Amino acid sequence: MSCVLILNENRLERDNMRAILARGLPQAEVLAAGAPRQALELLGEGRVSLLIADVPWFDADYCNMITSAKELSPDMPILVTSTGRRSDIVANVWRLGVQDYLLKPYRPEWLTAAAEVMMQWSARPAGEWEEEHRERYLKQAAEHMQAFCYKKCINTTKDYLDSLYQETDDIDVIRFSALSFAEGLARLGSPLGPSAQLKLSTVIERFRLRFDQQGRRHDSFLVFEKMWGIIFDAIDEDRGYQVSDKQRVLNYVDRNIKEGIGLDEAAEYANMSSSYFSKFFKRITGVNFITYMMDGKISAAKSMLTDTDMPVINIAYELSYSETNYFGKAFKKKVGLTPTEYREQHQHHRGPALRGEGGVSR
């Protein structure tokens, strides 16, 4: 039998929550605690599969309680209820690794529905292999982030998504894993200050509510790409990080490939003349600027062709091509196939969650 533990210091609210869950979840045992210490004692028994904690404010006592709860039961999901400000709750929820929250006042059915979903997560773990697999990629991403290499962070993220879709066709596992990976990226950004953390938390909050996005590889990638953008924006703004001129320039170019920045614009960012920047860029990359930009755009086009149903003309516009015909010619010259031919030959690489769910909404 599943076991739900309620922590709420207000006796009236605690009894009301217990009655709601007893009616809505007749298959579950519902326990209640009136203080953090009592809750931790019950968690120590090892029976609890879901903790619902009412947190009036995220002071040291409640933050320590949640941290201790996760240490006692690492796989147990936690649902927080609170009357606090949304911005404060969101930032603290993801920082502490809490899976979900409800703002008070809420309807009784909302509490039951949230508890049901989270108990399903607890009863259907993504699997030890997936958690270890995800953490390994997050560790790689952290190493690339510490080296301030945006491109390697993005490539590691793509590799994780590719491996996820190759390992499973279970849409629920894919959705759970994608959201967990996003939460991992937010944790990587935690040292970058409250502003960056709030932005990351907001992205996760929206992603969490979009089940359609979580099930599509390209949509998930766009969310992760946005999160990396927030992280590297914060790094750029904080001159305390010792990013080399070479790496700073590469990050700028790699982050703006889709926007189609030109040589003059990149040279201006690097505070160099166009002629000197052209030589500088070829020296650090081995190819000239135009070739580097073209290769980046073609790589992005391949992903959109195989992972979405987006029309070719829309892909061309996404990559800042004003002429679809020019995009088609450039793609064929590089790949040997037209965009349409490439899509037809690589449709079988799409994940099961994409097929039958329509195109990508932007």
Image: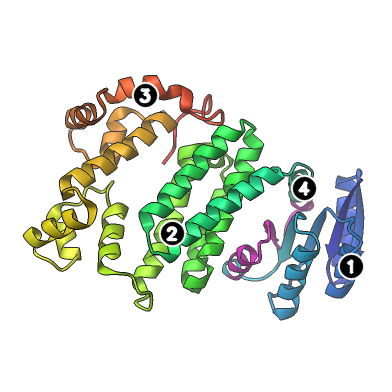
Residue 208 visible to the viewer: no
Disc nearest the viewer among 2 and 1: 2
- Which dot marks residue 33? 1
Q: Position of residue 6 (x, y in %)?
A: 85, 62
Residue drawn 26% across and 55% down? 253
Helix or strand or loop: what does disc 3 sit on? helix
Alpha-carbon neighbours of circle 1 within 10 Å: few (<14), some, or many (≥20)?
many
Disc nearest the viewer among 3 and 1: 3
Q: CA distance from mark 4 to mark 1?
A: 21 Å
Residue drawn 44% across and 62% down? 145
The magenta span reads: 88-111
- Picture quarter with the C terminus: top left
Residue drawn 39% across and 69% down? 235
Task: Name which residue type carries label 4.
Answer: Ser
Task: Name which residue type carries label 1.
Answer: Ala
Q: Is residue 243 left or right of residue 16?
A: left
Q: Which residue is mark 2?
A: 144
Alpha-carbon neighbours of circle 3 within 10 Å: few (<14), some, or many (≥20)?
many
Q: CA distance from mark 3 to mark 4?
A: 38 Å
User: From what the image shows, is residue 240 above or below residue 148?
Assistant: below
Q: Which residue is mark 4?
A: 122
Q: Which residue is mark 3?
A: 343
Q: Position of residue 11 (x, y in %)?
A: 89, 70
Task: Name which residue type carries label 3.
Answer: Arg
Q: CA distance from mark 3 to mark 1?
A: 57 Å
User: From what the image shows, is residue 81 above or below residue 356?
Assistant: below
Disc nearer the start of the sequence (3/2): 2
Disc nearest the viewer among 4 and 1: 4
User: From what the image shows, is residue 351 above or below residue 75?
Assistant: above
The question of residue 90 being in magenta is answered with yes
